[in-house]
Image (cartoon, rainbow, N blue to C red):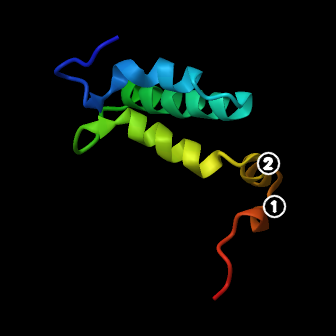
Amino acid sequence: MSNTTETPWLRYDEIAHFIDSVEDARLRAFLSYGITTIMMRRGLSDKEPAAPFDLIYFLEVLRAMFARREVLEGIVSGDFEKFAWPDE
């Protein structure tokens, strides 16, 4: 797998290694689904990112967002208070 001139993805070749390095199976599945969604969206749409898109950075952000299992569980269960911003 490598970048082509018509693919706006950066660091595409690193995806499998990055996802495989995640120990938590739920988080690994979530990251895999995120990448699958991006690839399917591109394949089913004529829309492209406005600029080259760094896939590993995207995965790093998702991993940071959902590294705490209670956040993923809160989203699924609808208990958003587990990760809400505190009131000022």
Q: Residue at 77% across / 68% down in the picture?
A: 81
Disc 1 and disc 2 in contact, CB within 8 angstroms: yes
Residue 84, placed above or below residue 27: below
Query: Residue 31, image x and y in percent?
Result: 57, 33
Residue holding disc 2: 73
Image-based side of 69 in relation to 65, left or right? right
Residue under the image location 45 percent in, 33 percent down: 38
For label 1, count other residues whose C-alpha is less than 10 Å away and answer few (under 14), some (14-19) or many (20+): some
Amino acid type shown at disc 2 = Glu
Mark 2 lies on a secondary structure that is helix
- Count of numbered circles on the image: 2
Q: Viewer-proximal residue, 24 or 76? A: 24
**Which numbered disc covers residue 57?**
none
Outermost residue to the left: 5
Q: Is residue 47 visible?
A: no
Q: Which residue is mark 1?
A: 79
Q: Looking at the image, which residue is at 63% across and 88% down? A: 88
Q: Please provide percent x and percent y for residue 29.
A: 66, 28
- Which of the two residues, 76 or 86, is positioned nearer the viewer here? 86
